[in-house]
Each structure stands twice: as C-alpha cells, then as structure tokens.
C-alpha cells in the first residue's frame, strides 16, 4: 500500500521505516528538509510540499499525520483536506484530544473525506517491537487501511483494533496514558521507599530484576525501570522534573465530568506538577504557619 507520512519526528520516522520494511511505499513529508532526506535514504519517496504529497499518492489517498497535537495538527489536517478529494482518508496518529478528533471527523465527513484517529503507544521501541494502536473511525474507512495497522502492530492480529467511532481511538489512548501515570508513580514511590531503608543496603537494580520474573508486578514499565537502574542506580544525572504531555490531565478532567472517582491517576498528575517547582510556595507557607502558631524554627534562604 502507498501512503504519506506527514511528520518525521522520532516516532513518525520510526513508523515510516517499519512500513517500508513491511513492503509499503511511503511518501515522506516534514518541514525539516534533513528529516526528509533521512527518510529518502531509508527508501521513502520524499515530498517538499503538501501539493506534492497529494500528487504522488494514488487515489483513494491515505495520509498519516504525526505532528504535535493542537494547532500543528489542526493546520496540517485542514491543509490536507484542501488538497484531498472525496473518498480519501486522513489518519491522525498523534496525541490529539478526542473532542478535537470528533470535531475534525465531522468537518471532514462534510467534505466527503474519511477521518481515522489512532491512539498510538510504543514510543521509541515501536520500530522493533511494533505499536499498540487504538483506532476510531468509520468501519469501512478503517478496513481500507487495515494493511497499515497490520504492519505497524506487533503482529497482524495483535496489538491493534477499531474500538469505536471517530474520537474513540484518542479517547481510549487518553485513558491508557492516565493509567500509565498511576503505574509509573507506584513504581517510583515503591523504589524510593526501598532506597530510604538504608540499613538494609538494598540494590534497587537487583530487586527490579527479581521482580521482572514471576512477580505479580512484572510489566514492560518494570523492564524499563530495571534498564534505568542498571545504567545508574542513583539516577545521578537526572533532574527530578517530570513533564506531562496532556493526556493525564485530560483523563482527570473526563473523570470529573463523568462523576468517576480516579484518585490514583489524579494524584499521579499532581505529583508531576509538583516535581516542576523547586521551591513550592505552599511549603514555604506551611513553614511560616508553624513558626507563627508554635514558634517552630524555619530555614532561611541563604
């Protein structure tokens, strides 16, 4: 199958390579000329404009958009829509908000275009291991591009599936990432407690390896934990600053809207937010209050 990959960041480039290795033809487009040249060296056919992308694709066309969520995705989808014809398909494989995906699907349907939203998980390991894909969109539109999913997935019949109408793919991926926040936080806290038990002189990397086999808490995230601790058990060069890409907070907002209690995911998100503040004002105020009512000592900034 011949399709376009729009956006050649690390994940987009890896997906293009996996598709090429699977026998597909790929039109590669990115705002970065160097990224296009790298894709061409891997066997893709480069395109320098979206007009060229549309001209190089056979009809009905299929383009996979892999650019940052928000305005970049909106602009790219609108630009493709202006160049595509009824029956063509636009796939959004990024981390878009599912509400945007529902809106975009409606807008494209009015123009006779198919929209497929793909919540994609796998990160930098996807090239070798395959990607987990949660897919939303019209059943016939999804079926037409089935070969793409079968190639990108860990196996043709594993790790991917249509979960519902347009928007549902990104919705399920949003919840997936919320769960990921909670799992990561639980591992982080557990290992910190063990690190604090200094009299036992525990080897965190050894324990992670033990848990990887037979334990009820074994997982791919634990495998990655073991990798990180094997490289540096004290994580010496890593700053305790944890960003979030949006899906976790969207999950929390959705839980509130649906009156669903999600304390673990919510607290994991809050912990990430806290990690970015080196001197939280709330903690300063707590120290000041203890001094006010009890005369307790406070530490002053040097």
Image: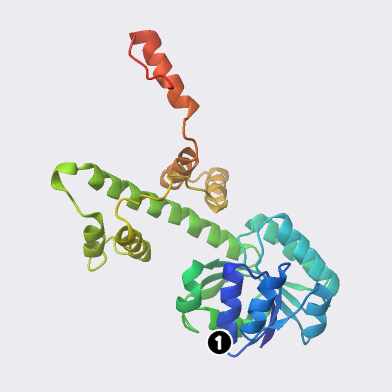
Q: What's the residue at 18%, 43% (across, down)?
A: 198
Q: How is the image coloured?
A: rainbow
Q: Position of residue 31 (x, y in %)?
A: 73, 67
Q: Is residue 162 left or right of residue 234?
A: right
Q: Nearer the viewer, residue 7 or 140?
A: 7
- Tell me if residue 64 can be seen: no
Q: Is residue 145 above or below residue 11?
A: below
Position of the N terminus by quadrant: bottom right
Q: Position of residue 101 (x, y in %)?
A: 68, 61
Q: Is residue 290 left or right of residue 171?
A: left
Q: What's the residue at 21%, 63% (across, down)?
A: 210
Q: Nearer the viewer, residue 247 or 276?
A: 276
Q: Position of residue 20 (x, y in %)?
A: 60, 85
Q: Is residue 80 above or below residue 1?
A: above
Q: Which residue is mark 1?
A: 21
The image quadrant of residue 51 is bottom right
Q: What's the residue at 77%, 61% (across, down)?
A: 75
């Amino acid at each position: 199958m011949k399709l376009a990959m729009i956006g050649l960041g690390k994940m987009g480039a890896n997906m293009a390579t996996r598709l090429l290795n699977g026998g597909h033809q790929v039109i590669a487009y990115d705002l970065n000329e160097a990224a296009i040249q790298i894709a061409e060296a891997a066997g893709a056919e480069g395109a320098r404009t979206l007009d060229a992308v549309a001209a190089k694709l056979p009809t009905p066309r299929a383009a996979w958009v892999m650019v940052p969520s928000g305005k970049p995705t909106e602009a790219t989808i609108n630009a493709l829509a202006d160049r595509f014809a009824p029956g063509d398909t636009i796939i959004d494989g990024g981390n878009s908000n599912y509400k945007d995906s529902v809106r975009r699907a409606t807008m494209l349907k009015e123009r006779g275009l198919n929209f497929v939203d793909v919540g994609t998980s796998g990160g930098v390991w996807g090239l070798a291991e395959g990607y987990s894909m949660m897919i939303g969109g019209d059943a016939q539109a999804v079926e037409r591009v089935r070969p793409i999913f079968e190639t990108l997935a860990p196996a043709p019949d594993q790790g991917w599936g249509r979960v519902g109408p347009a928007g549902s793919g990104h919705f399920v991926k949003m919840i997936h990432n919320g769960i990921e926040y909670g799992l990561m936080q639980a591992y982080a806290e557990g290992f910190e407690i063990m690190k604090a038990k200094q009299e036992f002189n525990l080897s965190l990397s050894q324990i992670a390896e033990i848990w990887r086999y037979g334990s009820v808490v074994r997982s791919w995230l634990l495998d990655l934990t073991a990798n990180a601790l094997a490289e540096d058990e004290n994580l010496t060069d890593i700053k305790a600053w944890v960003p979030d890409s949006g899906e976790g907070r969207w999950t929390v907002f959705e839980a509130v809207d649906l009156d669903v209690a999600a304390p673990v995911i919510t607290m994991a998100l809050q912990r990430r937010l806290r990690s970015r503040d080196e001197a939280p004002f709330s903690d300063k105020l707590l120290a000041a209050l203890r001094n006010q009512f009890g005369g307790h000592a406070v530490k002053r900034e040097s």
